[in-house]
Image: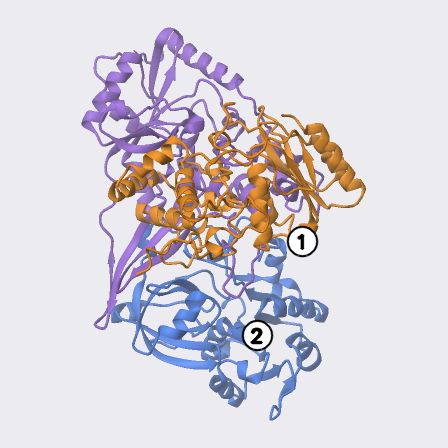
């Protein structure tokens, strides 16, 4: 099925955004202390859908919240009762503006783990009810390397509607999924569909080529993936982990990290059980009650993180877990770049 | 301020003389003109060492890591870093005879954008206070000053102040990077991130963030040296210094002008008792 | 997802003090229809929660062939287990999710000699299989149980072991690490007794082993020496888990999820995994 492409300009897009915000529950990047986080907005003024990629938090918490209630319970002398919590406020029909391409890809990647065996229906429901608007970047940031990975950045279908900046102030609005197509038909007025008009397609292609040429970081993904899988015992992990201060920021802001912990908060007779983010860089992550820890050293935890991103997840689910957004390197207090680490590991000799 | 050559030479000499096993310094990040810490075990690598006004991160944080524990370590410290080192020494976290400290008379460091860091503008001890070797021209002690954002806090009422901080902490994602990047947060089980603590168990509710950060800042009250490692690590760019500077100011005013780690053997304001300590809050 | 993590309430029917730090909790779901429906295979585990303290992973130590209840044997080790020992009394309610994980290959080991090698609390998952096999005794051939602990007080399921001993079709070998007065059985660590006393027949034998990491390490070496092929040695792994659903990432070793692909593995499978358990 082919989807429509519409042409408009900056003012037309503003109008579309405004119409969306007034009609739908809308989330968009809102700035605070120089950092953008996705929040519910009621006017276009509050937010900036074109927020810089390096300064924007992942959209993941809108699908997999940093902390969510599993259940409430009450126990007293009369017995115990368990009640599931209230309705899911993230599963209502909504639109998210200004999602970055890599971030949207992150959601697509996460679907693999959420769909195997036990199905995380909440995640699916939230995604199904959401229309994602995503502007294709014009220029890569210092730590970006999305084009080097195993997915088609140019024709990414993880977003419902993609926006591409053309030449001379032209703006192309492309539906990438059926949901996006229907949404645009309902909400776009007057703007004409360009269909497969050659000039528009050429323009979009050119934008992509310029964007792809702006990358500082490039890797041969297939080669790195294959080499990494043979280098579990590489001493390079030890070298790479030396700088790490184990602060866990990388995992908390990563668009694809999905490890979580379950914890109880109980006050007197009533309590709530939460599911909240956790990180494999945390020393407690695998520490067993008996005192045994399969990953006691920092480099082992680092190895788990990078191997999971580049080898294990691919082995299991067929997609690479890292989407190349570079957020971990940006947020890291000592700027460790996973790109550098995996490339370095791949370049070392095989150790059995 | 550029001591790169001196530091390279000293590090190479220390390795050659067999005085250290590890050297902790700075190197260029490799992708821009900023610097990142580097932990060196191979004498050949000392050539990557640099030190300029871009050497921001407080390296004493590495003294609690796997690679330096029970080893002889050489490291570079600025004024603020040496104060945290002083505290680590009194708190028996590191042994003085295992360290070779290169002190720097710091002229202030700059942030990613090249602007002088705010804590450097307020800095009162620019020269390292504990060292084996000193680099640069001594800057001398300066007066203790408090920045406008802290004095402004004092004008707010209690309720207003609470609301102000609650609003700030709204964006906290409870990753605990602040605690991990702090050189003085070395507890094996931290009250704000241990998994079984029912109050601060990492749930990302706004009340949990508020309480956790408040508790954390109180544990550092009278110990924080304002190196701003926490702010550098915070992915949400929270102005965490507001908490620490406010505490510092209250302690300075109430506990005989105490400033953490300035003197050798300093125990932190709350770990020593003086008859002059305020006691009007005791019922 | 969250709905999958909500436990069902179960009542603690009986508490049996096995050793100074191990207790067996006999559980029944509050909802009788659920108890009726609830079934599991030997080797599977449940998430056991003491509401307010947290959730822990324990294997079910009884067999589904004994209907109407299920057992969890819990050793006091961490914060939650200490809370469980301290606070749970008979008649109290706890939360249970499960059963999760794979199980011992009960079909595949049919018609074989079975050698169970257990140490300490490691007998718990084996007990589930032993009960199952006793209840299907005709399906299996020779039956040997080698069980060891540090001291005689640390031996679990003492009453049940006495019953096994009375059963003439089962050979039971007990051992403790150091000699004690009034101890008439073997003295020595499990691998030593395995090689010197049990001297198992290798042909047509499946070994099922579980115990503390150090015992497993040396037992596997002994089995190697005795000439058992790794495919015929089955063990069950202990790894920190939280969701049990293959989502939380805690039990991830390589591309394997212990909670879904395990906890039961053959020694051959373990050898292929990265050394992180």
Tell me the tag on residue C118. Answer: 2
Circle 1 residues within 10 Å: few <14, some 14–19, many ≥20? few
Residue marked by disc 1? B70
Whether residue A244 is visible here, answered yes or no, is no
- Please say if B30 is above or below A127: above
Residue B2 lies, in percent from the top left, at 65, 26
Q: Residue at 47% of width from left, 36% of height from top?
A: B144
Circle 2 residues within 10 Å: few <14, some 14–19, many ≥20? many
Residue A85 lies, in percent from the top left, at 24, 53
- Please say if C49 is above or below B128: below
Q: Residue at 46% of width from left, 17% of height from top?
A: A208
Classify residue C100 as left or right of residue C1: right
Classify residue A117 as left or right of residue B16: left
Q: Residue furthest front?
A: B276
* Marks 2 and 1 close (CB-CB < 8 Å): no
Q: Which chain does orange denote in the image?
A: B
Q: Colour of chain A?
A: purple
- Please say if B238 is above or below A168: below
Whether residue B130 is visible here, answered yes or no, is yes
Same chain letter for marks 2 and 1: no
Q: Colour of chain C?
A: blue
């Amino acid at each position: 099925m082919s989807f429509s492409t519409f042409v408009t300009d900056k003012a037309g897009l503003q109008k579309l955004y405004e119409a969306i915000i007034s009609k739908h529950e809308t989330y968009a990047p809102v700035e605070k202390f120089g950092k953008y986080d996705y929040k519910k907005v009621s006017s276009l003024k509050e937010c900036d859908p074109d927020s810089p990629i390096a300064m924007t938090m992942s959209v993941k918490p809108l699908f997999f919240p940093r902390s969510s209630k599993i259940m409430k319970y009450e126990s007293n002398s009369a017995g115990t009762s368990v009640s599931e919590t209230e309705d899911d406020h993230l599963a209502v029909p909504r639109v998210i503006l200004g999602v970055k391409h890599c971030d949207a890809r992150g959601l697509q990647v996460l679907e693999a783990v959420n769909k195997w065996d036990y199905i995380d229906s909440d995640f699916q429901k939230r995604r199904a009810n959401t229309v994602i608007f995503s502007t294709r970047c014009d220029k890569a940031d210092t730590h970006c390397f999305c084009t080097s990975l195993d997915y088609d950045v140019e024709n990414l279908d993880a977003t419902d509607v993609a926006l591409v900046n053309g030449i001379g102030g032209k703006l192309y609005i492309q539906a990438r999924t059926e949901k996006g197509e229907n949404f645009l038909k309902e909400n776009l007025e007057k703007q004409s569909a360009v269909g497969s008009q050659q000039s528009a397609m050429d323009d979009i292609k050119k934008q992509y080529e310029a964007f792809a040429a702006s990358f500082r970081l490039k890797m041969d993904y297939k080669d790195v993936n294959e080499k990494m899988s043979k280098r579990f015992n590489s001493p390079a992990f030890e070298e790479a982990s030396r700088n790490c201060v184990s602060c866990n920021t990388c995992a908390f802001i990563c668009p694809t990290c999905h490890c979580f912990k379950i914890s109880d908060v109980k006050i007197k007779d009533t309590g709530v059980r939460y599911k909240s983010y956790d990180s494999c860089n945390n020393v407690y992550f695998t520490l067993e009650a008996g005192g045994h820890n399969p990953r006691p050293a920092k480099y082992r935890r680092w190895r788990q993180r990078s191997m999971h991103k580049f080898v294990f997840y691919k082995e299991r689910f067929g997609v690479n877990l890292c989407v190349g957004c570079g957020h971990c390197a940006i947020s890291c207090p000592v700027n460790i770049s996973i790109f550098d680490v995996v490339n370095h590991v791949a370049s070392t000799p095989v150790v059995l | 301020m550029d001591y790169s050559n001196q530091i390279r030479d000293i590090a190479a000499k220390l390795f050659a003389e067999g005085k250290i096993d590890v050297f902790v310094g700075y190197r260029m990040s490799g992708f821009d003109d900023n610097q990142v810490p580097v932990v060196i075990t191979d004498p050949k690598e000392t050539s990557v060492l640099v030190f300029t006004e871009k050497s921001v991160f407080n390296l004493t944080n590495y003294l609690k890591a796997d690679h330096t524990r029970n080893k002889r370590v050489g490291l570079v410290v600025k004024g603020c870093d040496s104060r945290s080192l002083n505290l680590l020494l009194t708190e028996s976290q590191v042994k003085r005879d295992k360290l070779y400290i290169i002190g720097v008379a710091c002229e202030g460091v700059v942030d990613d954008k090249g602007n002088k860091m705010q804590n450097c503008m307020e800095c009162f001890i620019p020269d390292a206070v504990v060292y084996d070797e000193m680099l640069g021209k001594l800057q001398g002690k300066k007066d203790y000053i408090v920045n406008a954002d802290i004095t402004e806090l004092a004008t707010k009422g209690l309720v207003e102040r609470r609301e102000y901080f609650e609003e700030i902490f709204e964006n906290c994602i409870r990753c605990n990077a602040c605690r991990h990047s702090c050189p003085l947060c070395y507890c094996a089980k931290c009250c704000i991130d241990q998994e079984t603590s029912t109050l601060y168990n990492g749930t990302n509710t706004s009340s949990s963030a508020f309480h956790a950060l408040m508790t954390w800042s109180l544990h550092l009250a009278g110990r924080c040296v304002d190196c701003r490692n926490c702010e550098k690590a915070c992915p949400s760019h929270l102005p965490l210094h507001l908490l620490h500077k406010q505490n510092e100011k209250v302690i300075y005013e109430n506990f005989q002008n105490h400033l953490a780690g300035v003197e050798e053997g300093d125990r932190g304001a709350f770990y020593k008792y003086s008859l002059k300590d305020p006691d009007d809050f005791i019922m | 997802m969250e709905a999958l993590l909500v436990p069902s309430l179960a009542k603690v029917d009986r508490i049996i003090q096995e050793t100074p730090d191990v207790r067996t909790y006999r559980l029944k779901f509050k909802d009788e229809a659920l108890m009726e429906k609830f079934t599991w295979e030997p080797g599977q585990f449940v998430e056991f929660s003491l509401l307010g303290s947290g959730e822990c992973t324990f294997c079910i130590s009884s067999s589904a062939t004994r209907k109407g209840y299920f057992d969890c044997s819990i050793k006091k080790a961490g914060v939650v287990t200490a809370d469980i020992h301290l606070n749970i009394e008979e008649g109290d309610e706890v939360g249970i999710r499960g059963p999760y994980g794979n199980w011992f290959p009960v079909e595949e080991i049919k018609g074989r000699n079975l050698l169970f090698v257990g140490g300490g609390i490691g007998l718990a998952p084996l007990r589930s299989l032993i009960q199952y096999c006793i209840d299907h005794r005709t399906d299996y051939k020779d039956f040997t149980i080698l069980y060891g602990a540090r001291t005689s007080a640390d031996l679990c399921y003492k009453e049940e072991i006495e019953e096994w001993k009375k059963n003439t079709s089962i050979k039971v070998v007990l051992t403790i690490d150091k000699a004690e007065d009034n101890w008439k059985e073997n003295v020595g660590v499990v691998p030593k007794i395995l090689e010197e006393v049990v001297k198992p027949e290798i042909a047509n034998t499946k070994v099922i082993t579980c115990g503390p990491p150090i015992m497993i390490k040396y037992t596997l070496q002994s089995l190697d020496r005795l000439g058992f092929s790794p495919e015929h040695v089955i063990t069950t792994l202990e790894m920190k888990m939280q969701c049990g659903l293959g989502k939380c990432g805690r039990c991830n070793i390589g591309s394997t999820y212990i909670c879904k692909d395990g906890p039961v593995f053959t020694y051959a499978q373990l050898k292929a995994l990265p050394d992180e358990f």
